[in-house]
Amino acid sequence: MERLHGSCRRLIWLNPLLRFDGFEARACGVKAMLPRVDEFRSVHNLDALADLCASLDKNSVRSVDPRRWIEAGARRVA
């Protein structure tokens, strides 16, 4: 993931499971990759895909920041 992140301007990870409000990054692989991902986006419907297309020429926003899921998991553990 580090090499992939270093070879692009912005690494966007697409996950259809983000449509669920209770989604948590529990799998070890997801937890390991999130620090190197710039945006973590849902792709469960056409609206989500349209949002992705619209964001490709804009700066990252907090709602798609992968640190949101890392921080949520850390709060549950504490």
Image (spheres, rainbow, N blue to C red):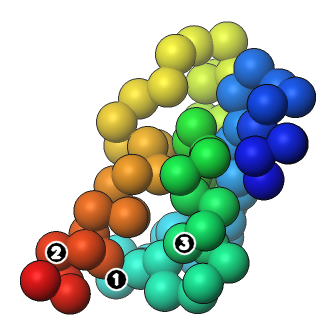
Which of the two marks, 3 or 1, is nearer to us in this view?
A: 3
Amino acid identity at mark 2:
Arg
Spatial CA span between label 3 and label 1 = 16 Å
* Vertical placement of residue 52 versus 24, above or below: above
Q: 10 Å neighbourhood of mark 3: few (<14), some, or many (≥20)? A: some
3 and 1 marks in contact (CB < 8 Å): no
**Residue under circle 2?**
75
SS at mark 1? loop
State the residue lying farthest toward the front. Answer: 2
* Vertical placement of residue 26 versus 15, above or below: below
**Residue under circle 1?**
22
* Vertical placement of residue 73 versus 48, above or below: below
Spatial CA span between label 3 and label 2 = 14 Å
Spatial CA span between label 2 and label 1 = 14 Å
Q: 10 Å neighbourhood of mark 2: few (<14), some, or many (≥20)? A: few
3 and 2 marks in contact (CB < 8 Å): no
Amino acid identity at mark 3:
Lys
SS at mark 2? helix
Looking at the picture, tell me which residue is in the foreground, 64 or 49. 64
Residue 76 in the image, given as x and y percentages of width and height: 19, 84
Residue 68 in the image, given as x and y percentages of width and height: 34, 55
Res. 49 in view: no
**Residue under circle 3?**
31
Residue placed at 48% from the left, 77% from the top?
25
Looking at the picture, tell me which residue is in the foreground, 45 or 8. 8
State the residue lying farthest toward the left. Answer: 78
Q: Earlier in the sequence, mark 2 or mark 1?
A: 1
Residue placed at 12% from the left, 83% from the top?
78
Residue 54's image quarter? top right
**Side (left or right) of 16 relative to 1:** left
**Side (left or right) of 78 relative to 23:** left
